Image (cartoon, rainbow, N blue to C red):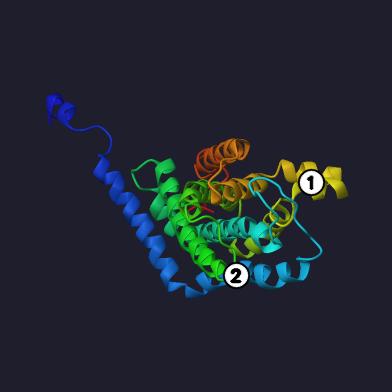
Amino acid sequence: MTSANIKDQPAGFSFAQYVTCLNGIVWREGLRFLHQRERFVSALVRPLVWLFIFAAGFRQVLGISIIPPYETYILYEVYIAPGLIAMIQLFNGMQSSLSMVYDREMGNMRTLLVSPLPRWYLLFCKLLAGTAVSLLQVYAFLLIAWFWDIEPPPIGYLTVLPALVLSGLMLGALGMLISSGIRQLENFAGVMNFVIFPMFFASSALYPLWRVKEGSPMLYYVCLFNPFTHAVELIRFALYGKMNWVSLAVVGGCTAAFMIGAVFAYDPSRGLSRRGPAGGET
């Protein structure tokens, strides 16, 4: 082959090849989700238990004053709905990271990462696939919540979509970053207990931050610097057609930071994932 022919060859990959890769990864994740129906049910059971039982029991105890984005007094169920939506995405992000740990143990992850496509793009496609699955779960929850008199403005179901995508990407990237440091599947549950529950309870998902500040100023600052708090507030404001710019900046920045960390960690030459004796990732 002459040097002229080499120069005529296109450099890199075409747009169609990138789209084909994205479709393949999203389709695989979608099929896995359809085959694991209990995953869909469990994703709805958790927030519905909080909505139907917890909220009913604490409705009179935890009254909610008029705070943005609400323009009037609201029921406690209405207040915690955005937090429960974010909880769905949090658990889905961790569930997706669990599947990555499983794929790594079974050798499927090595097959994906040895693709000639850029590693960051493969991980981003995986992240998009997990976020798409979480959107289906969230809108199923909103449909059920509508029968429980949780009725945001009709336009809110559309304005909340970009917020859901961004928060889903952030929580999925966090789970991906955590999964890079987990060596065995058995260790996953213990690690998740130190991530999911502190992030969820030390946030504005269940109670306004001003109430937290009255009880414990130290816990208030912990909640304030919790990225999950800003994911909840971003969803809360977007659900009512408004924008919380501080939360948008925090969620966007954390998404970029977690994604960069995951790409670095899944690089076997630099990150946390190292090659084992058989050439696979550990």
Q: Dot 1 lies on which element? A: helix
> Residue 183 or 204: which is nearer the viewer?
204
Which residue occupies the foreground of this view, 33 or 137? 137
Earlier sequence position, callout 2 versus callout 1: 2
Q: Position of residue 9 (x, y in %)?
A: 18, 32
Q: Nearer the viewer, residue 166 or 156?
A: 156
Q: Which mark is residue 210?
A: 1
Left or right for 259, reference 214: left
Percent of width and height locating residue 180: 56, 50
- Badge number at residue 112: none
Q: Residue at x 34, y 50 (%)?
A: 22
Q: In the rendered view, does 69 fall on the left or right side of 17?
A: right
- Look at the picture and state if 116 lies above or below 153: above
Q: Residue 120, percent across and down?
A: 44, 41
Q: Residue at x 61, y 40 (%)?
A: 247
Mark 2, residue position: 148
Q: Amino acid at mark 2?
A: Trp
Amino acid type at image mark 1: Trp
